[in-house]
Amino acid sequence: MKRCFELARRGAGAVSPNPMVGAVLVHENRIIAEGWHEGWGGPHAEVNCFRAVAHSDEKLVAGSVLYCNLEPCSHHGKTPPCADLVVKKGVKRLVIANMDPNPLVSGRGTELIRQAGIQVETGILEHEGRFLNRAFFTNIMEQRPYIILKWAQSADGFMGKKGQRTAVSGPAALRLAHRWRSEADAILVGAATATTDNPSLDTRFYFGKSPIRVLLDGSGSVPAHISLLSDERETIVFGPYQPGLPASKRFTGTNAHTHVREVADVLFRENIGILYVEGGPQVLEQFVREGLWDEIRILESRQTLGGGVKAPSIPEGTAGYTSFEISADLVKICFRQSAYIPDNSNISVL
Ligand SMILES: NC(=O)c1ccc[n+]([C@@H]2O[C@H](COP(=O)([O-])OP(=O)(O)OC[C@H]3O[C@@H](n4cnc5c(N)ncnc54)[C@H](OP(=O)(O)O)[C@@H]3O)[C@@H](O)[C@H]2O)c1
């Protein structure tokens, strides 16, 4: 099952809002095939796993055990049901970590497979599986994006100098932050950050896709020439329509602040499974105040700034907490108490 998790993780940044799933086919202690869900809308892990069986091993499939970290689907979505495929291949046993969290389909896949006479074992490394797919579980159960708040701060708790673009993190931490971006579906910033820092919000220091950008600009104050509004990539703007701006950007058209719950709802409807909020503090604090966050990731440098824009405080009621060093910076990560977060000892976000 741990190998399934490793394979599943390869889909990070490519499958959301689908779950990350890996599958391993074992015949008498030998792995004869592996597969994972590689991209949203593409074949599921089980399909890729069966496809990977060597011609000479085909005859072994019926006597093999299929490990998969999520219950095989039983419905016709973008691909045919995987439960039917498992039955057709006639494996001896199926071992899974998590049942499908959607109450409308949960248990149907395993039921179909059991009815065909295949042994089914569930709940293996269940907590680890849920933690791996915490974004997917949050999407299904809470009908909103999984929300990660991220900021960089100095050793004395400042995010930058007021009105001035300030480099806070070192190059290694910056690279990690770009990796995190590549695993999100959207990155959100406020108007002051967009204007002062003029960020591109891309993943130029890491590989993988650059997420959709989201700007909160309630009074339409950001100038048209900033990167978020003037380059080719998509930006969703919550704020009034400004004449002369590219038509590809979407505006809510309201000349007022949009409640962050409404922002989360709109983005969820736009298929955003993982929302990464990069600040500044005024925006971050709205999400904290509403309890609308799942994870906080802080990159803390060893340098002090002696004053400036104060970083938010970590809210009460956090569950797991972990920290590690990356070159000259300290990475601090904490989680909101939820059913998808196991105890501290199992937390690894790298
Ligand atoms: N170190 C870091 O990680 C980091 C990250 C980001 C930013 N920063 C720093 O933080 C500073 C900016 O932070 P800040 O707190 O002053 O500002 P901010 O959070 O970036 O932006 C605040 C502005 O965004 C708009 N806004 C906020 N909530 C909104 C909502 N719900 N709906 C619509 N519009 C909304 C408002 O614009 P209007 O008032 O015009 O309506 C508000 O004034 C900069 O100095 C930047 O360098 C540091």
Image (cartoon, rainbow, N blue to C red):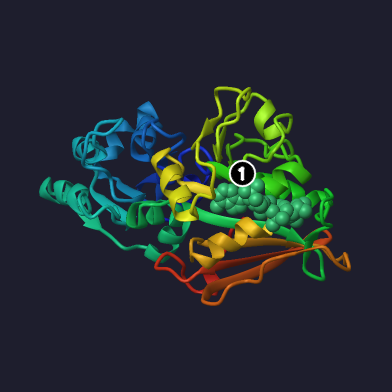
Residue 107, given in percent of the width and then of the height, sits at 20, 54
**Is the CB atom of the residue marked by disc 1 within 8 angstroms of ligand 1's nearest atom?**
yes
- Between 252 and 49, the one nearer to me in the picture: 252
Q: On the image, numbered disc 1 is attached to which residue?
A: 219
Task: Give the side of residue 91 with respect to residue 327, left or right.
Answer: left
Of all residues shown, which one is farthest toward the bottom? 316
How many labels, in total? 1
Task: Give the side of residue 271 with respect to residue 286, left or right.
Answer: left
Name which residue lies at 45% across and 55% down: 261
Q: Quadrant of the N terminus?
A: bottom left
Can residue 173 be seen in the rendering of this structure? no
123 lies above or below 110: below
Can residue 57 be seen in the rendering of this structure? yes
Of all residues shown, which one is farthest toward the front? 255
Residue 171, given in percent of the width and then of the height, sits at 82, 49
Task: Give the side of residue 74 with respect to residue 348, left or right.
Answer: left
Displayed quadrant of residue 196: top right
295 lies above or below 18: below
Name which residue lies at 36% across and 37% down: 44
- Between 270 and 18, the one nearer to me in the picture: 270
Q: Quadrant of the C terminus?
A: bottom right
- Between 192 and 70, the one nearer to me in the picture: 192
Name which residue lies at 58% across and 45% down: 218
Q: Secondary structure at mark 1?
A: loop
Residue 29, given in percent of the width and then of the height, sits at 39, 51
Neighbour tally class for label 1: few under 14, some 14-19, many 20 plus, Cα within 10 Å = some
- Between 130 and 256, the one nearer to me in the picture: 256
Instruction: Inspect the image, locate mark 1, and give the three-letter code of the amino acid beneath it.
Output: Ser
Residue 341, given in percent of the width and then of the height, sits at 46, 67
